[in-house]
């Protein structure tokens, strides 16, 4: 069994009205790597950088939000380039193995996250997706809810559209959708710095095997997940977090193959005392511990942890630390489950995620934001660009304003995905994959309209944007009341 860090600090996140996911968090300050010894500076000579391409809209990052943004911008008539550092689209939903797609229905079973999200999932083959059928969404039947709760598709006793998917199929489907829409894909390119002139982002420098090049654009969409572009361009951002919240932890996910998940689920449901003893034994023997989730197949188990806190995804040494620990966790968990868990007798290490599971780094300081204090109101923002399910049946659906994608001061750029403008508590659900699809589609459509009209993103006509989004299948509410100022006034 692989060597493990000992005596980690364990915190348990309880289920509350603000959280659905429960998990242990592990914090340990000892590090595997020795400290750095660099000091001082080194001068980099100035140079002319060749321009790789010029476009209407440059989307930086090909995760869920970036894929949706590029697709929406192209469908709205823009010339679009998507720049992605890995060899695939989908980000954490594919390369991060976050193959459990969170809820896209409200508590009545009505689908509210639609548009790109609905289309990309509808293109998956039947063998590439698992979850309850539409006739079950919103059901409160106790037996049905108990069945789907074990399969990450029922919460608070209500069945939801929350499928698990084949990550390789999602990579392919996302890729083909964007190519069909006319998006120029650039894989293996890492955006290094935004190009900023007179307070306006006009493109980005990126690195690849061809060296340093420039990509010029009328509008840039920051879909990096960490706000790399807007932060380096000088936009304001927030980075406050709740250290004991699972939504602000990190890990590298992994999958074990050769398992019998129905047998495991039967054991977990039928013998809770024995299961509890199993978990305690795992914590004692391994230190760090995580129970498995279902996947899209009964012979594959998904592990979205152990989740670790107290480390930063903006520090290369701490990111390296997470990866080292996580690969050790994968081996130790495989050994432990194979020896002790029903259904895991023939388990083997199938795959560790090539992308680190980051939940939080920066959040844009936008002209508006989603806030916990407004969850109860049910108000529809005048500049609504999407609707998110709420975290509990206690709350109505949550209106997402366009202003949450627009920087307060910086022009030429929009943000989407897990770093949009919101408070730390609202970030817990706005960072999820469906919500990233939602905000990405809004940012892409808005970027296309701004480029076409020759205006800044903050000056986009919101009514026109909402019409484009509805035409693309996005669910928007009829405005009956609002907590937001009129769209143009809010962004003046």
Image: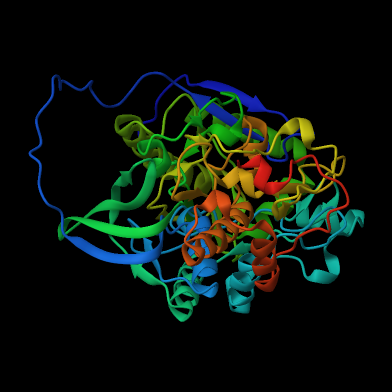
In the rendered image, the residue lying farthest to the right is 141
Residue depicted at 79% across the width and 37% down the height: 375
Q: Position of residue 303 (x, y in %)?
A: 53, 47
Q: Nearer the viewer, residue 17 or 197?
A: 197
The N terminus lies in quadrant: top left
Residue depicted at 37% across the width and 53% down the height: 354
Give the answer, above or below, for where 242 lies relative to 87.
above
Q: Nearer the viewer, residue 448 or 427?
A: 448
The C terminus lies in quadrant: top right
Q: Nearer the viewer, residue 153 or 81?
A: 81
Horizontal side, residue 328 vs residue 244: left or right:
left
Which of the 4 image quarters holds residue 271?
A: top right
Horizontal side, residue 259 vs residue 387: left or right:
left
Give the answer, above or below, for where 235 lies relative to 56.
above
Q: Position of residue 40 (x, y in %)?
A: 13, 20
Which of the 4 image quarters holds residue 18?
A: top right
Is residue 344 among what the camera can see?
A: no
Residue depicted at 47% across the width and 61% down the height: 454
Q: Position of residue 206 (x, y in %)?
A: 25, 53
Q: Position of residue 366 (x, y in %)?
A: 57, 38
Horizontal side, residue 370 vs residue 201: left or right:
right
């Amino acid at each position: 069994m692989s060597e493990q860090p000992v005596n980690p600090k364990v915190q348990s996140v309880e289920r509350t009205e603000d959280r659905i996911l429960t998990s242990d968090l592990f914090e340990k300050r000892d590090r595997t790597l020795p400290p750095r010894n660099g000091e001082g500076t080194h001068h980099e000579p100035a140079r002319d950088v060749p321009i790789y391409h010029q476009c209407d809209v440059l989307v930086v990052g090909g995760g869920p939000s970036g894929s949706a943004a590029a697709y929406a911008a192209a469908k709205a008539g823009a010339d679009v380039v998507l720049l992605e550092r890995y060899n695939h689209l989908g980000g954490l939903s594919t390369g991060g193995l976050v193959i459990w797609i969170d809820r896209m229905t409200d508590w009545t079973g009505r689908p509210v996250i639609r548009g790109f999200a609905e289309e990309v999932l509808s293109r998956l083959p039947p063998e590439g997706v698992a979850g309850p059928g539409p006739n079950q969404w919103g059901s409160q039947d106790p037996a049905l809810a108990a069945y789907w709760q074990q399969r990450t598709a029922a919460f608070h006793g209500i069945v939801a559209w929350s499928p698990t998917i084949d990550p390789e199929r999602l990579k392919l489907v996302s890729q083909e959708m964007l190519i069909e829409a006319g998006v120029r894909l650039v894989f293996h390119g890492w955006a290094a710095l935004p190009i900023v002139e007179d307070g306006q982002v006009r493109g980005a420098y990126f690195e690849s095997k061809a060296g340093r090049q420039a990509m010029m654009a009328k509008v840039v969409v920051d879909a990096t997940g960490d706000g790399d572009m807007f932060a380096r361009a000088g936009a304001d951002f927030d980075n406050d977090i709740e250290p004991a919240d699972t939504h602000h932890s990190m890990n590298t996910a992994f999958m074990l193959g050769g398992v019998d998940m129905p047998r495991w689920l039967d054991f977990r449901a039928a013998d809770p005392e024995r299961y509890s003893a199993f978990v305690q034994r795992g914590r004692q023997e391994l230190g760090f511990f995580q129970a498995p989730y279902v996947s899209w197949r009964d012979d594959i188990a998904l592990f979205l942890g152990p989740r670790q806190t107290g480390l930063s995804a903006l520090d290369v040494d701490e990111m390296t630390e997470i990866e080292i620990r996580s690969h050790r966790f994968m081996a130790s968990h495989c050994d432990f489950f194979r020896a002790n868990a029903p259904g895991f007798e023939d388990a083997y290490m199938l795959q560790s995620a090539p992308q680190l599971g980051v939940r939080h780094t920066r959040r844009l300081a936008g002209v508006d934001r989603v806030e916990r204090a407004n969850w109860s109101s049910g108000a529809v923002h005048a500049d609504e660009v999407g609707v998110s399910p709420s975290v509990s049946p206690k709350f109505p659906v949550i209106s997402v304003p366009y202003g949450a994608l627009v920087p307060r001061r910086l022009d030429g750029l929009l943000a989407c995905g897990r770093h949009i403008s919101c408070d730390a508590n609202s970030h817990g659900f706005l960072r999820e994959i469906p919500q990233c699809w939602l905000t990405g589609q809004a940012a892409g459509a808005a970027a296309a309209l701004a480029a076409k009209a020759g205006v800044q993103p903050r000056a986009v006509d919101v009514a026109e944007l909402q019409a484009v989004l509805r035409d693309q299948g996005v669910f928007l509410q009829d405005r009956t009341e609002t907590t937001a100022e009129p769209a143009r006034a809010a962004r003046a």
